[in-house]
Image (spheres, rainbow, N blue to C red):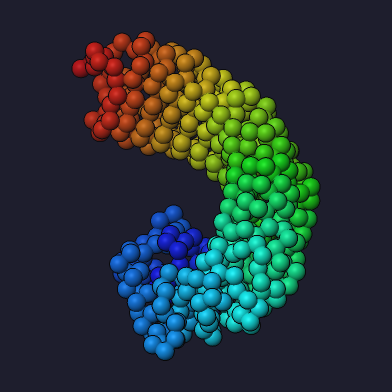
Amino acid sequence: MYLDIACFLPDVDFRIASYMWHDYDRPHDEIEVLFRMSLIKIEENKIGMHSILRCLARKIIFEGLHDPGTCVGSYVPVITQDPEKRIMGADQHNTEVAGFEIPPNTTFLSLGHANIGGKFTGALLSVRWLHWQGCPRDIKAIDFHLENLVVLDLSWSKVNESWGCWKGIKMEHLKVLNFTGCADLLVTPNLSCCPNLEILILERCSRLVHLDLSINDLKLLVTLNLTFCSELSMLPVKMDGMIALRELLIDGTSIRELPESIGRLVRLQILSAANCFSLAGVPASVCQLKALSVLALDDAKILELPESIGDLGELRCLSLRNCRGLEKLPETIGKLKDSLVELDISSSGISKLPDSTKNLRSLKVLKMDSCFIKEFPRDVGELINLEEVHASWCRNLEGAIPSGILKLHHLKELRLRGTRISSLPSEIQFVSSLQTLDLLHCTLLKELPLLPSNLIDLHVDPGLTQDM
């Protein structure tokens, strides 16, 4: 497994890499062992390796395969590998020109910009991960036999919906298909050739305008990533066939509306639609997504949220940053008392939090920077698990901070920069966990009460005195 990781691109997504090791009994345990031995690093689901350790591993593989009588082993960057024999060959050039032969039992194959000929099609039977970021549009190998392929990475290549291999390709075991940055892709291909697909990545396909209807037949699809497909303006009307979908990422697209059928994606956990500047509404059917934990609608043109938003009993994060047309939250938001951990209404049009907000006892982070809130929530003391309050540059926020703040025993950050608040309660000294207090440019605040002894970062205007 250590040698496998050395062959991958740096910082590969662990979820993708794990498909290479489904034959292992407990791959997560082996990854943990490598991590504890400092042979690999793991950050935010990315697996990486120090360059020295990577070179060492590749040298081990290289020496295991090198044959002085052939060209195999002459070029290290592009790798083929057998997990049992730990052998490797490499070629940075066009395979036909270089006379390169793909070793038998190859499981990881990176081809760079090679345009392989028909004679190679049978040599790919054992390949589980095909990394072909320079795949040309005029491919010469028409009939691919990729029965064991689980990961196909064609990112930043020239493939499009008319690519010569789509009709002849057979990938029944394919789990991951990566089209990141395929600027020539206008329409997704017919995906009936990979019925077991679990991750489909179309990120930054800047000219993509249409999703083939076959996408709704992917009953095992878990992740659909359409991030920054800037020309994509609509999702399929029927999405209910993707019954396993857990993650739908449409950030930075031109999507105008979400289809009603989205409410039938009963396993959906993450719906991220940040920077969808054309998104004008959220259908009530979204509130049928009982498993939804993250809903991000930053920068949308929405004017309201469905009144039944409180039915999302598993919702942990609701982000409405820069939704300038949104003037209020539904009163039913208080029903999220056992689930909602983070609420972000920064730079929105909201001027008052609903009374039911006091019921959000699981809330840890409240962000309302640069919005139109006029007064600090009077019942803030009821939010007993609150750790962060961000209310900087709320120009209309004025008056006193309520004394109920002393109940916030977990509060670590209180940011009120640029507001018109006039006083802090003397009880703030008892907020023992408070570490950061930002009061810069609070021009109506003339003095400070006694502050908590554990305070680390205090930001105030020069001349503001503290009452001792």
Residue 118 position, x and y percent, is: 66, 78
Say if residue 190 shows up in the picture.
Answer: yes
Quarter occupied by residue 122: bottom right
Q: Nearer the viewer, residue 366 or 336?
A: 366
Task: Please name the residue shown 31% across and 10% down the image.
Answer: 446
Residue at 35% x, 79% y is 60
Q: Is residue 162 above or below residue 79?
A: above
Left or right of 95 on screen, residue 459: left
Who's the residue at 30% across and 33% down the image? 435
> Residue lying furthest left in this view?
468
Q: Residue at x 39, y 32 (%)?
A: 408
Q: Is residue 219 visible?
A: no
* Position in image of residue 404 (x %, y %): 42, 24
Where is residue 431? Give x, y as percent.
33, 30
- Residue closer to the observer: 314 or 343: 343
User: Residue 152's x, y, as percent?
Assistant: 59, 67
* Total tally of numbered discs in the picture: 0
Residue positioned most to the bottom: 69
Q: Quadrant of residue 334?
A: top right
Quadrant in which the N terminus is drawn: bottom left
Q: Nearer the viewer, residue 420 or 176?
A: 176
Vertical position of residue 278 compared to residue 179: above or below: above
User: Where the C terminus falls, by quadrant?
Assistant: top left
Q: Is residue 315 above or below residue 57?
A: above
